[in-house]
């Protein structure tokens, strides 16, 4: 029997008659009290659908530790992700200076895959186009959203967006194409 990693999140979807997601139920696989407490403290991971059943969203606050781990995995050692002073010099002109450490753009965008797989276990995330419009700061709460805009058979096109929770400013947006798993009969 294979054991999953610490604090592994599991999500189960409920579907209507068409197989479209209605709501997502969230839970944490308890593999150790310390791991579960650390996961709960570092983020608020809630996934919810809109009334229209075609929008999925989650809230997240990335920590310094999240950025350090992501940087170690990807090899991205850019100091704007780790030092306030370096982040303040980023971006060129005085009006565009960043205040505070910046979350890796791809770390913010990685939330889209989690939303897709929570609604459609077995989905293939085929393509993603992204535009990075504003920096996400470490410790800042964000909302990641995917909205179904077109479906043709198993192919589904989604608008994707990451925005600031406090003011709604768009930080990352784009379009994703997913190949959905076959529906059970």
Image: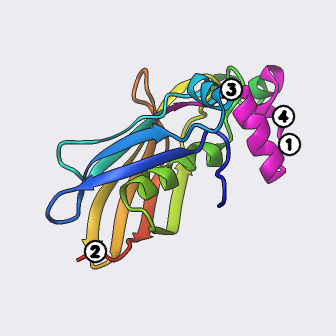
Residue in the picture at 43% in, 68% down: 177
Disc 4 is placed on an element classified as helix
Q: Are marks 1 and 4 in contact (CB under 8 Å)?
A: yes
- The residue at the far front in this view is 1
Q: Considering only vertical position in the picture, is 50 above or below 140?
A: below
| x, y percent for residue 178 | 42, 69
Disc 3 crowd, CA 10 A, few/some/many (<14, 14-19, 20+): few
161 vs 131, nearest the viewer: 161
| x, y percent for residue 152 | 27, 77
Answer with left or right where residue 100 lies relative to residue 182. right
Which residue was labeled with disc 3?
34
Which residue was labeled with disc 4?
79
Name the disc covering residue 163, or none. none
Disc 1 is placed on an element classified as loop
Q: CA distance from mark 4 to mark 2?
A: 48 Å
Which residue was labeled with disc 1?
77
């Amino acid at each position: 029997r294979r054991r999953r990693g610490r604090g592994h999140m599991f999500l189960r979807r409920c579907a209507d008659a068409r197989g479209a997601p209605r709501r997502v139920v969230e839970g944490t696989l308890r593999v150790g009290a310390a791991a579960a407490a650390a996961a709960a403290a570092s983020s608020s991971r809630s996934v919810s659908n809109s009334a229209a059943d075609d929008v999925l969203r989650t809230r997240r606050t990335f920590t310094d530790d999240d950025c350090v781990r992501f940087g170690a995995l990807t090899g991205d050692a850019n100091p704007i992700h780790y030092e306030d002073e370096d982040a303040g010099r980023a971006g060129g002109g005085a009006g565009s200076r960043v205040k505070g450490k910046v979350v890796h753009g791809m770390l913010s965008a990685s939330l889209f895959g989690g939303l897709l797989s929570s609604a459609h276990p077995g989905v293939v995330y085929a393509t993603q186009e992204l535009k990075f419009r504003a920096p996400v700061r470490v410790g800042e709460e964000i909302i990641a959203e995917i909205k179904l805009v077109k479906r043709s058979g198993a192919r589904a096109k989604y608008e994707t967006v990451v925005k600031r929770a406090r003011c709604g400013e768009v930080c990352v947006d784009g379009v994703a194409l997913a190949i959905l798993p076959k529906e059970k009969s």
